[in-house]
Image (cartoon, helix red, strand yellow):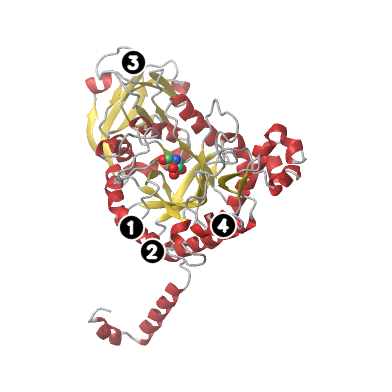
Amino acid sequence: MKPHSNHRFRRMGRWSLLLAAAACLATALPAIAATPLPRLVSAHGRHMLLVDGQPWLMLGAQVNNSSAWPAMLPEVWPAMDALHVNTVQVPIAWEQIEPSEGHFDFSFLDTLLSQAREHHVRLALLWFATWKNNGPAYAPAWVKLDNKRFPRVLKKDGDTLDSLSPFAASTLDADRAAFTALMKHLRAIDGERHTVIMVQVENESGTYGTDRDYSTAGDRLLQSPVPAAVLAKTGRKAGSWTAVFGKDAAEFSYAWAIAHYIDQVAAAGKAVYDLPMYANVALRDPFHPGPPGGYASGGPTDNVLGIWRAAAPALDLIAPDIYLPEYAKYTAVLDRYSRSDNPLFIAETGSAAPYARYVFAALGHGAIGFSPFGMDFTGYSNWPLGARKIDADTLKPFALDYELLRPIASLVAKAGFEGKLWGVSEPEQTHTQQIDLGAWQAQVGYGLPQFGMPEAKGNPTPQGGVLIVQIGRDEYLVAGCHARVSFQPAGRNAGKHALFERVEEGRYVDGQWQFLRVWNGDQTDWGLNLTSEPQWLRVKLATY
Ligand code: DGJ
């Protein structure tokens, strides 16, 4: 207590004392949110995340797996600040919060939250528990060393794998209890602030090396009826897993078992603190997947997305981890995970420069967020999956995206939800793209000089991207990098001649447009050239 506070206390009247007592009591009770809880809304097949009641676009980055310790945070914040992120994904490991059964330590979480608030970012927590990339590496020793109580997955030949069985009630009980304790603590320390806006439940679940768990429970499931929710989602008629799904029954029933397990963990967490929750995916190759087990079988890969959505209603979304640099594969994943029943969130993506441009295509597919992985200065890089090293230069292409998007993130999230947003990224093989805006057709070219009309050759390494937001009848916000944009009349304007009525360059400060200059002459004659500067253009189109 400060020295003068006794004196002040004496001067307080009876009513003030009662109010103070009520305030103390209130802090002892579970926190009541002053603003609405973060939540997802969906309409017309599109989705939006609301944080404190406002549209929120997650301009994210994820720290390395072993960076979630107080001593590492000084290596995290400078990278996050340089990136201009508004959301940071940080693991919370089961072994860290419950080193011995029933004894919890949330000191890292407390430190993390107070530092995140100082850095004006929100957090998504990643629950590393029964599954972290298929195995229980992040489960406490009392779990991962007790094979009897917490059995591992059995292969067909009777050998065991380093993946915990989703059929063990004892494992589910222990994981769920720890997760519930975490959510309870989170609500107590953050229920009014919502520093944490989302929680990922487990990490890249599924099992490598088998299509399913060949335990007795796994065998039994195959012969039991497919739940009605799965039948409804997949349009099948009733029967056992084997009868309904034939050669896919092993993988599909296993997917159901894992999804159902994670659903129960998520539901228990939501019951104490109802934050949006999601599961991330170790993807299979979208065009040449190979057999299950070669990829993490049972995880929410694209072939079992319907089963997961049916089995895990407590999960708000299933989010792909995209480490596929090729345009065709990247955009195939965006297509498959952006569904009317699944908001798109790029939970992880590569840290190498070519990945930065995909934020535009992701937004064009309706994404509520995007997040490169391993973005801190702890000295680790997951090359060749991501960049060779993580330093200031590595961050630059992502920082450019986020510098552009952060001041206007709420408007972008809202425009996406309203169907007034288009976004594209540069392909490797083709160097022009058409975007259908209804009354206009936008033409995008990559690798062009700023002057003249030569054939587009593509950037030396693909790095271009464009975002267009409709703000009026013939009025658009245009931004992006390393690309040229021009407009042709279409729809109700078809057959007319087009002109730029006015092109303003400006900035958004606190969501408000600040005019800098008008672009005309060379700056508009050949189209609008977007470079490596964070520029927003307000474009008014007209016909004559
Ligand atoms: C995907 C996982 O989800 C991450 O935690 C990490 O292990 C990367 N793979 C590889 O760096």
The C terminus appears in which quarter of the rendering? top left
**Secondary structure of residue under mark 2:** helix
Vertical position of residue 284 compared to residue 207: above or below? above
Q: Which residue is mark 2?
A: 107
Q: Residue at x 43, y 31 (%)?
A: 361
**Alpha-carbon span between mark 2 and mark 4:** 26 Å
Vertical position of residue 495 compared to residue 380: above or below? above
Tag 1: amino acid: Pro
Q: Residue at x 39, y 18 (%)?
A: 432
Q: Residue at x 55, y 42 (%)?
A: 43
- Specify which label sits upstream in the sequence, 1 or 2: 1
Mark 1 neighbour class, 10 Å CA radius: few under 14, some 14 to 19, many 20 or more = some
**Alpha-carbon span between mark 3 and mark 1:** 49 Å
- Specify which label sits upstream in the sequence, 3 or 1: 1
Label ID, residue 456: 3
Vertical position of residue 504 compared to residue 106: above or below? above
**Alpha-carbon span between mark 3 and mark 2:** 55 Å
Q: Residue at x 56, y 46 (%)?
A: 163
**Alpha-carbon span between mark 4 and mark 3:** 61 Å
Mark 1 and mark 2 in contact? Answer it, CB < 8 Å. Answer: yes
Tag 3: amino acid: Ala
**Secondary structure of residue under mark 1:** helix
Depth check: 538 or 188 in front? 188
In this view of the protein, can residue 227 be seen by the observer?
no
Q: Is mark 2 within 8 Å of ligand 1?
A: no
Mark 4 neighbour class, 10 Å CA radius: few under 14, some 14 to 19, many 20 or more = few
Q: Left or right: where does residue 9 sit relative to residue 35?
A: left
- Specify which label sits upstream in the sequence, 3 or 2: 2
- Specify which label sits upstream in the sequence, 2 or 4: 2
- Closer to the observer: label 4 or label 3? 4
Q: Which residue is mark 1?
A: 70
